[in-house]
Image: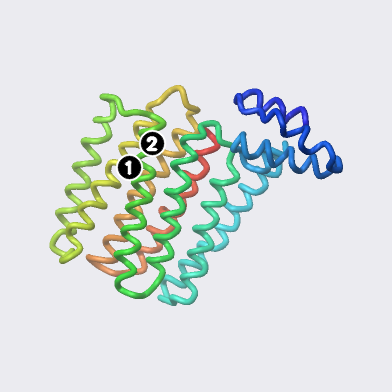
């Protein structure tokens, strides 16, 4: 076993005493691959970091951003022309990119990553549902995003339990959310209850991000990325609701989609900067 792998296993108290002796008969190259896999399993770090190639991790992260920026105008074009066959693959690809961005991040707070990742994946599912033209897909998308927000809420409050200071965020955000719901209410019909539940959960999500922002033990950059990402997500949903229930128009997607995807990328990158 490599010296690095032994150190990692000792550090976490998980060293497998039989790991090396069970593989002594294998060629050195195979033992090295097994050692790296063993390290990756126990350390729960992204592959680029485990292999000690931080520049690879940076390159991969930069690539996700560049690809997202290239695909965004394409998505906006298809959205403005309402071409479902173009929207679905492009939107899904950008969503896969923010999931990939999360996976390649270092994980200084493993629990944060463990709750954030499924949230991002459920939001990916929501993007796919909303890109489909069938009417019932909107409800499935809403549910998928709702579950994603629940994971975000758990992620934030698990990492930074709330204090009394959270009311500095909870009160104004709740007032804004109530005002939004009062404006949407007459247009919601049978979607009144689902949308109300969604607004409540996303409001709690923003408060959770604020709770994380207030935790000084964590790196400021990561806290700021998470809070800005949550706020961008919250604002983007206003444009989704306006487009769906109040007044359909390209301006909703032109403003809402960059805010949404920008927010998701900020949340994904916050994993590596806490």
Q: Residue at x 36, y 57 (%)?
A: 144
Please, what secondary structure does the residue beneath circle 2 have? helix
Q: Position of residue 179 (x, y in %)?
A: 17, 49
Residue plotted at (68% across, 42% down): 48
Which quarter of the picture shows residue 172?
A: top left
Look at 67% across and 30% down and name the residue there: 16
Image-based side of 164 in relation to 44, left or right:
left
Q: Is residue 186 left or right of residue 264?
A: left
Image height check: is 172 above or below 165? below
Q: Tags 1 and 2 in contact by the CB under 8 Å rule?
A: yes
On residue 205, which mark appears? 1
Q: Which residue is mark 2?
A: 156
Image quadrant where residue 133 sits: bottom left
Label 1: element kind? helix
User: Closest to the observer: 13 or 135?
Assistant: 13
Decide: is 102 above or below 183: above
Residue 245 in the image: x percent, y percent? Answer: 23, 65
- Few, some or many C-alpha atoms within 10 Å of disc 1 (few <14, some 14-19, many ≥20)? many
Quarter holding the N terminus is top right
Q: How is the image coloured?
A: rainbow
Q: Up-down: is 181 above or below 20?
A: below
Question: Disc 1 and disc 2: Cα gap in Å?
Answer: 8 Å
Give the mark count.
2
- Taking depth in this image into account, of 47 and 208 the one nearest to the observer is 47
In x, y percent, where is residue 258? 44, 56
Closest to the observer, 118 or 120:
118
Q: Is residue 259 above or below residue 253?
A: above
The percent coordinates of residue 132 (x first, y second) are 40, 72
Quarter occupied by residue 56: top right
**What crowding class fits label 2: few (fewer than 14 Cα within 10 Å), some (14-19), or many (20 or more)?**
many
Please give the name of the residue rendered at 44% of the width and 77% of the height, measured from the top-left corner.
83
Question: Does label 1 or label 2 sit earlier along the sequence?
Answer: 2
């Amino acid at each position: 076993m490599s010296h690095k792998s032994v150190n990692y296993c000792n550090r976490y108290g998980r060293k497998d005493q039989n790991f090396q002796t069970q593989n002594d008969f294998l060629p050195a190259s195979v033992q090295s691959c097994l050692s790296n896999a063993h390290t990756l399993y126990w350390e729960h770090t992204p592959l680029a970091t485990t292999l000690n190639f931080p520049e690879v991790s940076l390159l991969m992260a930069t690539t996700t951003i560049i690809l997202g920026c290239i695909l965004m105008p394409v998505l906006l074009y298809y959205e403005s022309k309402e071409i479902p066959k173009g929207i679905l693959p492009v939107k899904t690809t950008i969503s896969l990119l923010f999931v990939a961005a999360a996976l390649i991040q270092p994980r200084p707070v493993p629990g944060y990553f463990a709750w954030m990742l499924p949230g991002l994946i459920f939001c990916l599912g929501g993007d796919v549902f909303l890109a489909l033209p069938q009417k019932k897909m909107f409800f499935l998308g809403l549910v998928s995003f709702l579950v994603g927000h629940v994971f975000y809420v758990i992620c934030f409050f698990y990492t930074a339990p709330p204090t009394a200071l959270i009311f500095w965020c909870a009160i104004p955000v709740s007032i804004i959310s109530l005002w939004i719901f009062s404006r949407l209410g007459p247009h919601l019909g049978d979607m009144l209850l689902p949308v109300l539940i969604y607004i409540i959960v996303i409001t709690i999500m923003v408060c959770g991000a604020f709770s994380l922002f207030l935790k000084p033990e964590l790196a400021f950059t990561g806290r700021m990325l998470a809070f800005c990402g949550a706020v961008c997500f919250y604002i983007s949903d206003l444009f989704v609701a306006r487009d769906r229930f109040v007044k359909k128009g390209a301006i909703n997607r032109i403003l809402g989609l960059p805010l949404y995807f920008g927010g998701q990328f900020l949340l994904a990158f916050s994993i590596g900067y806490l």
